[in-house]
Amino acid sequence: MTAYLILHGWQNHRPQGHWQHWLAGRLRGLGHEVAYPQLPDPDDPELDVWLGELRRQLDGLGGERVVLAHSASALLWLHAVDRGVVGDGDADRVLLVSPPSASVVVRHPEIAEFAPPAARPALPGVTRLVAGDDDPYCPEGAREVFGDPLGIPTEIVPGAGHLDLDAGYGSWPAVLEWCLDGTVPLTARPE
């Protein structure tokens, strides 16, 4: 059985309309184990607290483990790898969705400590990156900032913004398909 850990980003209170909430419901409906925790203090998060919660959530999962991390949680994952909080065997597949760049993160004191680590750690499991070509939280481009430097296969979705509710990502069938088959492309949601 596959177990999924879905991690939200900064200021995300897991609204029902968000693709992550939609995805958790679909995966549970298919009989999968799904952890979709509300991370502590999403408006003013502490990196060390979120790292501890990430470790706790991973320890509670069995079977094949798939992690989906959006926005600040994508940076959380990079910090977890960099600090040795996660390593080989902690995730079979990882999808990093719309990680924000350091140039944006450092302008917000609430999340400045989440700025991407300077090191380029070897990522456990099979990692993929997906982002919009017009993400306001990564104006330099996700492929340029994260994909190429970290050697992560990257898919850029035209006009997808931050892949959030504001960009129209309530349901997102392609991410469900990726969860079920990690080889499928991550495309824009149908209009």
Image: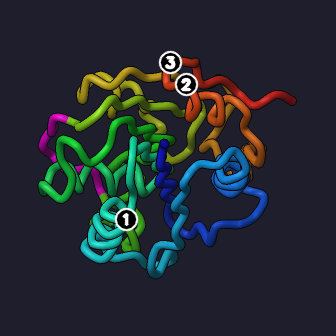
Q: How many other residues sit within 10 Å of disc 1, few (<14), some (14-19) or many (≥20)?
A: few
The Cα–Cα distance between marks 3 and 2, rounded to whole angstroms, is 5 Å
Q: Which residues are magenta?
A: 115-122
Image coordinates for residue 99, horizontal then vertical, percent: 43, 45
Residue at the location (28% across, 65% down)?
55
- Provide the secondary structure element on which disc 1 rests: loop
Q: How many other residues sit within 10 Å of disc 3, few (<14), some (14-19) or many (≥20)?
A: few
Residue 164 sits inside the magenta stretch: no
Colouring style: rainbow
Q: Which residue is mark 2?
A: 181
The Cα–Cα distance between marks 1 and 3, rounded to whole angstroms, is 26 Å
Image coordinates for residue 123, horizontal then vertical, percent: 22, 36
Residue at the location (50% across, 47% down)?
137
Q: Which residue is mark 3?
A: 183
Please state which of residues 3 and 127 is positioned toward the viewer in this rendering: 3
Image coordinates for residue 81, horizontal then vertical, percent: 20, 49
Residue at the location (33% across, 33% down)?
146
Q: Are marks 3 and 2 in contact (CB under 8 Å)?
A: yes
In the figure, 96 relative to 35: above or below?
above
Q: Is residue 98 left or right of residue 49?
A: right
Report the amino acid beneath label 1: Gly
Of the two numbered discs 1 and 3 on the same chain, state the one appearing first in sequence: 1
Residue at the location (33% across, 57% down)?
76
Residue 60: mark in rendering: 1
The Cα–Cα distance between marks 1 and 2, rounded to whole angstroms, is 23 Å
Of the two numbered discs 1 and 2 on the same chain, state the one appearing first in sequence: 1
